[in-house]
Image (cartoon, rainbow, N blue to C red):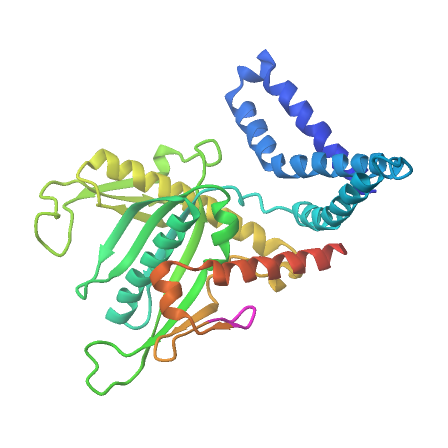
Amino acid sequence: MLQEKLQSFIKRSEDIHNLLASSEILSDIKKMTSLSKEQSSIAKIVAAAKEYNQIISDIEDNKMLLDDKELAELAKEELRELEQRKPALEEEIKILLLPKDRNDEKNIYIELRAGTGGDEAALFVSDLFRAYIRYAENQGWKTEIMSSSESESGGFKEMVFLVKGESVYSKMKFESGIHRVQRVPETESQGRVHTSAITVAVIPEVDDIEIEIREQDLKIDVMRSSGSGGQSVNTTDSAVRITHLPSGIVVTNQDQKSQHKNKERAMKVLKARLYDMQEQERMSKEDANRKEQVGTGDRSGRIRTYNYPQGRISDHRINLTLYRLDNIMQDGLLEEIIDPLTADYQARLMEAAGV
């Protein structure tokens, strides 16, 4: 029964509340952090459960008033509203009860890298980066550039930035993969359409307690920052390159004038990449059903095409095509793609769970 299932969440929330008030937990930062995260992760389902219980109770109360001459009309009106809200809330609860990705509530690093297409790919990195920034602003999220590598054409060979806010990973995880762009370059005199591609990786941010890195596993190099010239290029050895020897992962940061800040940022990105590598290995070991789901994090597949001559943006995973490319890119209206992807993913999960 739905109410019984929901009651277990209410009970767990109450237990966590009591535990967090205990002196034993207050002295254990790791345990307190874990419990606080769990409490936050079930907050929406607990609120929905309490509303559902209240609706059930109110329906019963109003049914008892139908025989009361003075209150019958008022009771009928309330019953109508409650019985409309009940099935809608049940659908919301079904979605809330779906298996959660443990990273859904986390902040993320988005890494954009130019692939085939040279300068055109680098320019599209810049275009997609701006679209993501506008989408983040529309969502009320905060962004921070972690590192970047400019191209001679004015685009970016690579861009890594942090996105912070509510449920960021849950919305952006479907962006991982190869994004293909088709357009006529400004330098193309014959008006021919060129095809280029960039790779997007969405990586959850991790806490220090989630990933431990041994000092002896790191090779840290400092160097002079490189760039396109001008005052923005540092003249001191402030750029930092960190190599994680066991995995071979290399992270470089030169965007800050302080070597200490560049090292700090590089370490954060390194930890996120190591965590992401572990997640990719974990997912690859899971059953084949996951391969049929949207948002598996597979970065080797072409997921979306941006065709500028036709003003078309197509997501190949759900066969979605919109002829609003300029609006979506300029105004950051990515919810027009992300929301259908999320709905499709949830529908697949509900079908698999037999909900």
Which residue is pictured at 23% across the width and 33% down the height? Answer: 260
Task: Please indicate whether residue 1 sits to the left or right of residue 86 in the image.
Answer: right
Q: Residue furthest front?
A: 70
Task: Please indicate whether residue 257 sits to the left or right of residue 311 in the image.
Answer: left
Residue 318 inside the magenta-drawn segment: yes
Q: Position of residue 187 (x, y in %)?
A: 19, 78
Residue 269: quarter of image: top left
Q: Residue furthest bottom?
A: 190
Residue 307 vertical placement versus 289 (above, below): below
Residue 213: quarter of image: top left
Q: Nearer the viewer, residue 72 or 124?
A: 72
Q: Quadrant of the C terminus?
A: bottom right
Q: Quadrant of the N terminus?
A: top right
Q: Is residue 247 visible?
A: no
Q: Nearer the viewer, residue 85 or 296?
A: 85
Q: What segment is highlighted magenta in the picture?
A: 314-320
Which residue is pictured at 63% across the width and 58% down the height? Answer: 290
Task: Please indicate whether residue 90 sits to the left or right of residue 241 in the image.
Answer: right
Residue 227: quarter of image: bottom left
Q: Position of residue 136 (x, y in %)?
A: 39, 50
Q: Position of residue 318 (x, y in %)?
A: 56, 69
Q: How many marks?
A: 0
Q: Residue furthest right?
A: 67
Which residue is pictured at 12% across the width and 48% down the height? Answer: 233
Residue 147 inside the magenta-drawn segment: no
Q: Position of residue 96 (x, y in %)?
A: 66, 45
Q: Is residue 231 visible?
A: yes
Residue 52 vertical placement versus 193 (above, below): above
